Amino acid sequence: MVTMLCFKSRSYFLWALMAWTLSVSAQTPISGRDFIVAVVDAVPITNHDVTLRAPQLREQLKQQGRAVPEGEALLKAALERLIVEKALLQHAKETGVTIEDEAVTQAEQRLAAQNQISVDALHKKMKAEGSSVERLRQNLHDQLTLQRLTERNVPSRIKVSDVEVDQAVRVRQNASLDTNPDIELAQILVAVPEKSSDADMATLQAKAQTALAHIKRGDDFARVAKEFSDGAERDKGGLMGLRAANRYPTLFVDATQKLAIGDATLVRSGAGFHVLKLVTKRASGVVTVTQTHPRHILLRPGGQLSQTTARAQLAEYKRDIEAGKADFAKLAREHSQDGSASEGGDLGWVTPGMFVPEFEEVMGKLQPGQIADPMVSRFGVHLIQVLERREAPISERELRDMARNSLREKKFDETYQLWAQEVRGRAYVEYRDAPQ
């Protein structure tokens, strides 16, 4: 497994804030008089700032499916967001959080890639719309600062108890009862020979219905099976064995899915008529997870290699691979700048949550054999191919780890909001009225 790709931080929730940096930075200044509406630890927030933030907040709330305030209420909500942000930035400064210029440059490259333009084109867009490169980089610097500050302070505040993990594990195990339980069926098969006439078919169907009637009135299944069944399991009382549902024919599973234990039903297949009785149904105790087997080629922009050039190079690799002119593994060994290069870019079988979100999002949309267009992550530019997928059992320990991580994810936003409000509460905030 590749260490740098496998690092996953929940702080990527702040990563999404960078998506609006382009639109915020590119706004043309509002004409007319501007004025200060609030001061946070000597840092002013202007009416212009609030007016720019309000549309972004509206869109963010809409995407989250939350109620969107309008008019003055939206402006007040935008102002409050800005106050919290300024308080956090001041706290970051006081606690020594620093962001390197290289990190800002990489963020700038990712932002350009998200908008499918080069960094030079991004800069020209800024200038054409009345903003500046300096303002863009400052916005990116602030967002990276908030991200790093959050990483340092929030995860340690999240508490997940063993009781919560136990409950989450039980829910997951109970879900397996609905998706792939262990079941045992008993069968009476009335075989239908090939080229049977309609009259023969009717006779055999009547025989199967008679067998079902015997079962429904309470007759012993083993005795009825011995009398009526043509199946190989007739001498075993018709029992077919306890196994995971997905190891039975889909027709049998679908036909018995809603039966209570002890009930029976009649279905028809290409082999004949089947009287099926549900003997046992229970949670398997084995929880499965969808695993993916991907490989990738990674190019890391820097020096003479720009992000635009890296994307173009990987796009050419993709065309050659799909045209049969090149081999993915050979290209990975020769060109990939990742630890997996020696393995032809092979990342092995992976479970959800092992890669950074931007990588997983693209990987998750691919069908086996499909290659994605070059994508940008915080590590560079990737060409990803999914080789195969499977449902694989996970151990009790893995299940508990997954449950704990999931609970931490769910608690992250709430914990972040509480912490951010604590920081805001310690800041000096002065509201100011609009000039008359």
Image: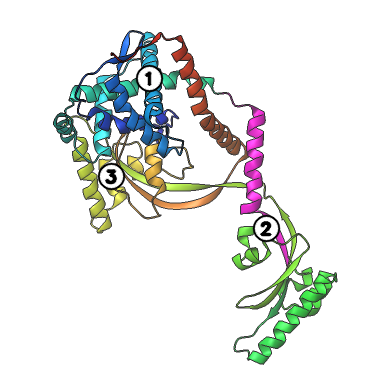
Circle 3 packing at 10 Å, graded few (<14), some (14-19), many (20+), is many
Q: Main secondary structure of the magenta part?
A: helix
Residue at image location 33% in from the left, 24% down from the top: 143
Residue 98 in sight here: yes
Who comes first in sequence, dot 2 or dot 3?
2
In-front residue for pair 283/171: 171
Is 368 a magenta residue? no
Q: Is residue 349 left or right of residue 47?
A: right
Who comes first in sequence, dot 1 or dot 2?
1
Q: Is residue 53 left or right of residue 403?
A: left
Q: Is residue 288 left or right of residue 431?
A: right
Q: Is residue 15 left or right of residue 292?
A: left
Quarter holding residue 133? top left
Identity of the amino acid at label 3? Pro
Residue 280, percent from left and from top: 75, 58
* Residue placed under numbered mark 2 in the picture: 243
**For the N terminus, which image quadrant?**
top left
Disc 3 from disc 1: Cα separation: 33 Å
Residue at image location 54% in from the left, 35% down from the top: 406
* Residue placed under numbered mark 1 in the picture: 85
Disc 1 from disc 2: Cα separation: 56 Å
Residue 15, percent from left and from top: 36, 30
Identity of the amino acid at label 2? Arg
Colour pattern: rainbow
Residue at image location 40% in from the left, 21% down from the top: 80
**For the C terminus, which image quadrant?**
top left
Q: Which residues are magenta?
A: 159-186
* Residue placed under numbered mark 3 in the picture: 374
Identity of the amino acid at label 1? Glu
Tell me whether the residue at label 3 lies in contact with that at label 1, contact meaning CB atoms closer than 8 angstroms.
Answer: no
Residue 322, percent from left and from top: 27, 57
Disc 2 from disc 3: Cα separation: 43 Å
